[in-house]
Amino acid sequence: MKVHELLKLVQLEWLAERFPSELSGGRSPSNRKCCCSTSPFGALDAKVRKELRSWLRRLHDDLHISTLFVTYDQEEALEVADRIVVMNHGRVEQVGSPQDVYDHPQTSFVYEFLGTANRLQGKVDATGFVADGASSPIAAHAHFSGRALAYVRPHDLALYPADGAHRDGIVVGVRRDRGGAGSRDMARA
């Protein structure tokens, strides 16, 4: 009975009458508490990949097994994982929950790797970060001064006219909260 339930869960009930020796390595039964897969959805189209991500997440939760899931698809990793290890040329860049790694990237590589990011060049001084071409600083928590890069996700960036009379400049607002109604730091460009 349990075998048939598990086969149905993984959509392989059609293999119920086969012997283990007749199955490929990927379909062979086991009592393992851990599953490892490397880019399992790599050759599939986007719609099927999305459906399988949801299915894999449910399977993982239903069977209570640990899964090591290697993927080059950032969206896939953020959706399926409880914890993410971001690697760059064999070196671990950051480890954490998907939300933590996305919201608090520890390196420029992680920031750019996990989604669209606007990169602003500028400098850090005693007043904060000043983007090249800007006249006002954006508050920054830096323990150095000199040339720097600032990263801002598009959904955290708001642009406003500098004032009603002059349309030659803009004010850049960096959202401090996800709700959009919180405080913003501004820099005139």
Image (cartoon, helix red, strand yellow):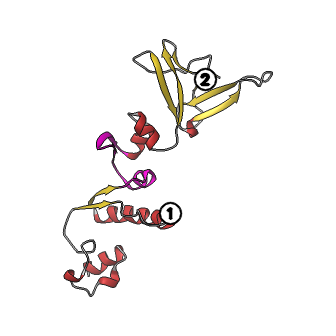
Q: Which residue is mark 2?
A: 186
Image quarter in which the N terminus is found:
bottom left
**Magenta includes 80?**
yes
Residue 120, percent across and down? 54, 28
Residue 150, percent across and down? 50, 28
Q: Nearer the viewer, mark 1 or mark 2?
A: 1
Residue at the right extreme of this rendering:
165
Residue at the front extreme of this rendering:
89
* Rendered position, 103 above or below 51: above
Residue 165, percent across and down? 80, 21
Look at label 2 and name its amino acid.
Met
- SS for callout 2: strand
Look at label 1 and name its amino acid.
Ala
**Which span of residues is magenta-colored?**
71-97
- SS for callout 1: helix
Residue at 61% from the left image edge and 28% from the top image edge: 173
**Magenta includes 26?**
no
Please state if 11 lies on the left or on the right of 26 as rendered.
right
Residue at the bottom extreme of this rendering:
17
Q: Which residue is mark 1?
A: 46
Residue at 78% from the left image edge and 24% from the top image edge: 164
| Residue 96 tag number | none
* Rendered position, 185 above or below 110: above
